[in-house]
Image (cartoon, grey):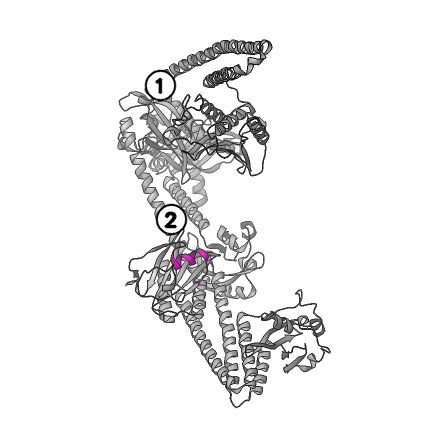
Amino acid sequence: MELFRFTLAYLFVKKSSEENFPSFSIERYRIMVEEALDIIYETDIQGNFKFVNGVASEILGYSRSELLNMHYLQLIPDENKQAVQQFYRNQVDSKESNTYLEFPIITKEGKKEWVGQRTRMFFNNGELTGTMSITRIKTERYNYIKALKQSEEKYRGILERLQFGLLEVDLDERIQYVNDAMCQMTGFSKEEMLGNVASDLLASKETKAVLDKHHQLREKNQGSAYDARINRKNGEPFYAIISGAPLYNLQGKRTGSVGVHVDVTQRRKDELELRRIQAELDKYTYALEELNRITSDFSLGPKEQLNQSFQFISEYFGLPFGFIAEFKEDNSTTFIEVLSSEILNQLNKTFPLEQTISGSAFLQEKLIAINDTSGTAYEKLPSVQMLGLKACIAMPVYMDGVKFGSIFLGSSDQTKDFTQYDLELFRLFTRYISYVLTAQKNQDILKNQTESLVQTNEQLQERQRFLSAINRFVTKILDEEDLFSLAWEIVENVISEFDFIDCVIYVVDEEKQCLVQLAAKGPKDKGNRKIKNPIEIPFGKGIVGAVAQNGKAEIIKDTTLDSRYFQDVGGFRSEITVPIFFENKVIGIIDSEHTDPNFFTQTHLETLTIIANLTASKLKNAQLRLQKEKSERELKDREALLRTVIQNALDAVVTVNKEGLVTGWNPQAESIFGWKAKEVMGRLMTENIIPINYREAHTNGMKNYLKTGHGPVLNQRFEITAMHKSGREFPIEIAIIPLKVSREETFTAFIRDITLQKSAREDLEKNLQKERDLSELKSRFVSMTSHEFRTPLTTIKQNVDLIEFTIEKKSPEIRPEFDKYFERITSEIGRVSSLMNDMLLLGKIEAGKVNVTIRSVNLLTLAKDIISKLSVGREDQRTIQLEIKGLEREIYADLSLMDHILTNLLTNSLKYSEGKPNPVLTLNFENLSELKISVRDFGIGIPEKDQKSLFSSFYRATNVKNIQGSGLGLSIVKEFVTMHQGTIELESEVNKGSEFIIKIPTLKP
């Protein structure tokens, strides 16, 4: 106490001298210590309490006298004692006078409190003389920090599972955090990204300017969302929508920014593809309009129209030289129209048609478009080499429906990339050339051709109208995400844009293997986006099912002529059906019907195909979102089901935490142990259901598992004694499963009262022992009987042989009269011997005395030997047909047992199919994990009522009549198959034959 007073005086006097504090008396120091809100205590050099203030008793629950008889380590949990003790030993060793440490303590009531302690040690000539500590309760702060850490871990876990890329940067744009999704987007690992400046690593110069603009918003504490192009690790760009926001610390100061990145590359590609198609379509439309202008200018003669249109087509394709030529029967060529005649003059001789591209188009009667002649079969043609031709297009020209010549355009300067619109335009222009040439021959035909061109122009305008409608259609559905809304948006826009009267969207149901109506506009529209009597169509059924199965779009001109058509709603005469593909797999169908026959055209088919292609990915994404929502609902249902199952389980289900406190107690636990849930929840399980002599082992086992992660009794079912509420002990069967929930260890036990089962099991063991004794007695009897029968049988056989020998020697002339008797006696002796052998073998099997020696066996060789043995000497010349499936290989089996199995089955197959086709033995090696053996005959078969008992000892089918047999063969075969861990099955029909199928798993020696 003197040391304590001296210490206080020293501290306050020193403080007073330094800061001009007034002097206080020792009594005032004492009052301050006693009235302090913190624990203040003094210990000796061994750590025993020498002084404690009143607050220490209030907080710790011990009286002063109790505390003054205690060591400070007695207040610290076992798991923390070593660390705290080592900390203060280090303070003594380093002679450090003041230290601060936070650690848990245990009050007298067993409550754990976290404290922050400042300790001063006093040294005299380097020797410790005592310590004084001021301790403050920090439990609330500790729990807050722990909850904050758990919240942060939960937040980080959510971020890691986000499907969107997440990036956190500091004020210098250096990456502080990145999730897995962002790494997958960019191709960088976390290690490669962390610490780097985000814009330097991922952004181009143009993107940096966009980022700088939005970083200025972060400085103003504003969030924003914007599009940006980001570079992957391999240099490949992708497009993302970035949603950014500033980050703050606990003091409200901005520390950086966070950005959520959504990959929209596919959407950007779709937009670019749509623009490309629109650009090609605009170019194509312009060309058609220009050609139409030229061909419609009747102030120009046919020759001038031909020249101007040919010049325009040459400029359109960027192919500077070309010609329209007539090929005559004498292999001569007449040029009707020529562009860049200087180049064509280089062709100083006439080549055979097959050696020119224009001639090949003429001979093959097809359009030839070559983007680049290099590497093609045309590269080595003399005409191509002479002109240095790189790109060209050619097509035959007809007059009056008869081949006339060719039109050709080419370039020696550059390659080309012909589009479908280019080819369509060239075909159209070639038809126009044919029209012009024919018009020069006959003015009447010119009029018809002009009308045809006007009609073609109208069709192209109609096509343009449809394509424009597609553009509007895509714009309307671009932002739809919900599956049902998307489907209804499609059918409603198809009806409004293309003047249809009916449109139905079907989606594929993979589980049911059918098509389900999702949206229907027209007669089936019930209003409010609902379908009247929605139907399901199996794959392959009807027109819709056929298209879903084969993936080919169809136009049905007249439904009354198509046998596949079935009426869902009456009155329709024509139908168009187009599959919706995603990753080369049909995911849905667009179907439309019309009351008029021959209503739907190729343009309609192309239009719906474009719609199907444009909506496929959105429809698939919508399906996936719907499936995800369904899966989440099912997960919740399964959780509810699991709770219901536990509540209604026949076993007791008890859950405890790592401290051994009960956290789960189902109704069956109440029934088995007598404790209500409210009586045991939150209490130690050992106090309620574990007998006293097992409690220490249980507690030690749990501690060992928490420390090492190993528990010998976990994850397996075992028997132990439990205790009822009444104190009665009874046997239980228990399985304990350790689980980690939210990083907290829990243990769930499934418990069953086996009092009755155990009693029954003991009775069963007694009965089984009696059965074993009886079986052993029977085996000895069978063995003895078989041996006893063999001696008289051998004597009979020897005497028959002796009689036969005597007759042969003394009276050979009468020998034939006795042959049939000798044969009958020998046959009967053989039958009895065979029966005795089977009985003896069955006895050895039942006694467990048949040894199985597994080794490599060539089953094919064995089968051939048995077939040869059974076939030799047969009067009916019958044999057994052998078939092999798969690649023949050696197997591991017991050679003797396999010989017996095959011999018995093959002998039976011949015996019970007299006068029928040869039986078939099939060895199937196709499955590497098992061998399949099949023995099939075409004989009398086995009645269904006999099949169940056929493998029982001494049982024979009711239709075998006078065919000899003991009824033991198949029972022995089944036992031998079982010894190989295999199975034997029977398929049979009376008067049609039987098939025995053996499956033996691949064994190892």
Note whether 43 is above or below 631 in the view shown. Answer: above
Q: Residues within 10 Å of mark 1 (few under 14, many from 20)?
A: few
Task: Check if residue 866 falls in the magenta segment.
Answer: no
> 147 or 46: which is nearer to us?
147
Q: Is residue 489 visible from the viewing direction of this image? A: no
Q: Residues within 10 Å of mark 2 (few under 14, many from 20)?
A: few
Q: Quadrant of residue 248?
A: bottom left
**Residue 747 in the image: x percent, y percent?**
38, 33
Note whether 329 is above or below 220 in the view shown. Answer: below
Locate the C terminus and report the quarter of the image it occupies.
top right
Asked which secondary structure carries label 2, the reply is helix
Residue at 52% x, 52% y is 183
- Whether residue 439 sits left or right of residue 330 in the image: it is left
- Magenta highlight range: 538-553
> 835 or 877: which is nearer to us?
877
**Residue 697 in the image: x percent, y percent?**
40, 23
**Residue 961 in the image: x percent, y percent?**
40, 25
Q: Amino acid at mark 1?
A: Leu
The residue where tag 1 is placed is 764
Task: Check if residue 549 falls in the magenta segment.
Answer: yes
Q: Amino acid at mark 2?
A: Ser
Number of the label disc, if any, that sits on residue 631: 2
Q: Is residue 340 visible from the viewing direction of this image? A: yes
Residue at 36% x, 50% y is 630
In 3D space, how far apart are the residues under numbered discs 2 and 1 (Cα atoms)? 47 Å
Locate the N terminus and report the quarter of the image it occupies.
top left
